[in-house]
Amino acid sequence: MLGIAAHDALRGGGTLVALVAPFAPPPIRGTRVVVQEVPADGARLRELSALAAAGRLTPRVAEQLPLTEAARAHALLEAGGLRGRVVLRP
């Protein structure tokens, strides 16, 4: 089952948020499992894109790497401790 490694790393009493209901693991060690499915919404995505383009929505980016360095991006994410997203550029 997907998500088990993340769930095992969660401390007792914590909350795991699953994005797809069929892959949500059962609660363990007093954890809580919440499913948060978000339907595709083109209008909302256009609105968010416009806010970003206008400089009113600023995503936090920790690293920008070329797509050829996808393995390095994955290693950075696995290591943890980043404050922001890793962005892959074409």
Image: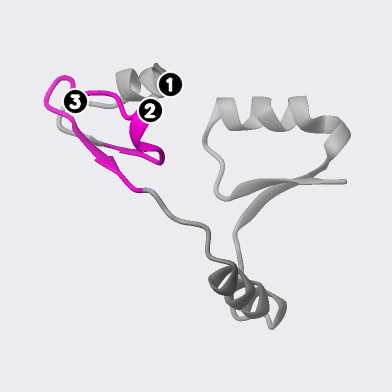
What type is the residue that disc 2 sits on?
Phe
Percent of width and height locating residue 29: 14, 20
Residues at circles 3 and 1 in contact by the CB criterion of under 8 Å: no
- Residue 81 higher or lower than 62, as above or below: above
Q: Is residue 30 left or right of residue 61?
A: left
Who is closer to the viewer here, 61 or 21? Answer: 21
Count the marks: 3
Task: Look at 38% across and 48% down and name the residue there.
Answer: 37
Who is closer to the viewer here, 84 or 23? Answer: 23
Q: Which residue is mark 3?
A: 27
What type is the residue that disc 3 sits on?
Pro
Callout 1: SS: loop
Residues at circles 2 and 1 in contact by the CB criterion of under 8 Å: yes
Task: Look at 62% across and 79% down and name the residue there.
Answer: 51
| Cα–Cα span, label 2 and label 3 | 12 Å
The quadrant in which residue 60 appears is bottom right
- Residue 24 inside the magenta-drawn segment: yes
Q: Is residue 69 left or right of residue 79?
A: right
Percent of width and height locating residue 32: 18, 35
- Residue 36 higher or lower than 80, as above or below: below
Task: Look at 88% across and 46% down and name the residue there.
Answer: 90
Mark 1, residues whose alpha carbon is within 10 Å: few (<14), some, or many (≥20)?
few
- Residue 60 inside the magenta-drawn segment: no
Percent of width and height locating residue 30: 11, 26
Please provide the residue range marked out in magenta. Answer: 16-36
Which numbered disc, 3 or 1, marks the residue that appears first in the sequence?
1
Q: Is residue 3 left or right of residue 27?
A: right
Callout 3: SS: loop
The quadrant in which residue 16 appears is top left
Q: Which residue is mark 2?
A: 23
Where residue 2 is drawn, which disc sits there? 1
